[in-house]
Amino acid sequence: MAGVLPRPKRKSTKSKPEVAPEEVPYTDTDRSGDTLDPDLSSLWWYGTVDSAFRPKGRNWPLIWAYIIEGGGSTKTTSATSMAVTAALGGFPGVVFDLDSNMSATTVLGYDETALKGKKTAIDLLYGRATLDEVALPARYRIGAGDDPEEDFEPIENLRVVPGSPAMAGADRALAEDADRNDWFAEILRVYKGDDTVLYLDFPASYGKMPYSVLRMLDELDSVIPSIKADPKAVKLVKWPSSSSETTGAPASWRCAAGVL
């Protein structure tokens, strides 16, 4: 299943069953008169989160990539909503806005005026800054002005790598210097944070920049080809004719292709 968060981790090191008990006590927790509300607080795994999960012991977190060749396909909506929901649930994350339209950046609280003098995704691609130097605390507007203290509220556990209009030239920059194709690999190699997921919001096209990022995914990461639920949009997903066409692709990608 695409976009699966890591399984909860037990708080205690004492010996406990590896599976939840078959009998779960039920109570009327919401006072609705319905006695079939599960009392999850009795379970040893309730309320625990392994936010430091690392696939196969690697030093960087899970990667969820939102990509499909089509504008208005809900890539940004899916990426930001899933990121915010997970962050509020205790799973730290970073949203990478790799689109020159900067939609994810805007959703998470920053416009071009707010970004004046700040580093953006293009600085990561050129190697002019580190992830921690670029990533900003995600936020949402609560006032009509531009005061970062009075008119915005931070979104706990979430950061955003701001997009930039200059990302429109990312493919050309990679073509001009082959060494730049390792820009995302280098970010992952030196990563030392505690995020659970890196959310990648791509432009509505395929090219050198998306490839330079997607090649770093393995079978535990997720490619999420978000689309609107209408016949025209569904055609954007090119279904492989057999499982052999998806050999080596992330499991979530093969699942989305219907060949698992």
Image: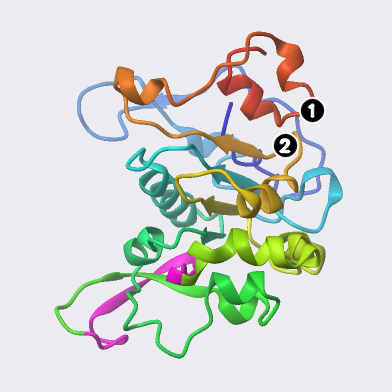
The answer to whether residue 157 is magenta is yes
The percent position of residue 108, horizontal first and vertical second, equals 37, 65
Q: What is the CA distance from the residue labelled 1 to the residue labelled 2?
A: 11 Å
Choose top left, top right, bottom left or bottom right for residue 176: bottom right
> Disc 1 marks which residue?
248
Q: Nearer the viewer, residue 52 or 47?
A: 52
Specify whether residue 127 is painted magenta.
no
**Rendered view: 187 above or below 232:** below
Q: How is the image coloured?
A: rainbow
Is residue 259 positioned above or below 33 on the image?
above
Q: Position of residue 213 (x, y in %)?
A: 67, 52
* Residue found at the very far left of the displayed protein: 144
Q: Is residue 1 left or right of residue 203?
A: right
Query: At label 2, which amino acid type do we have?
Result: Leu
Quadrant of the drawing holding the N terminus: top right
Placement of the C terminus among the 4 image quadrants: top right
Relative depth, front residue between 48 and 119:
119
| Residue nearest the observer in this picture, 69 or 10 | 69
Q: Quadrant of residue 121?
A: bottom right
Residue 195 screen position, x and y as percent:
63, 60
Give me the residue at 76% from left, 14% from top: 244
Disc 1 is placed on an element classified as loop
Q: Residue at x 54, y 65 (%)?
A: 169
First in sequence: mark 1 or mark 2?
A: 2
Q: Position of residue 255 (x, y in %)?
A: 61, 20
Residue annotated with mark 2: 220
Instruction: Name the residue type under label 1.
Output: Gly
Q: Examine the image and state in which quarter residue 64 appears.
A: top right
Residue range of the region highlighted in magenta in the rendering: 146-165
Residue, x 56% and y 59% (percent of image)?
93
What is the crowding at mark 2: few (fewer than 14 residues within 10 Å), some, or many (at least 20)?
A: some
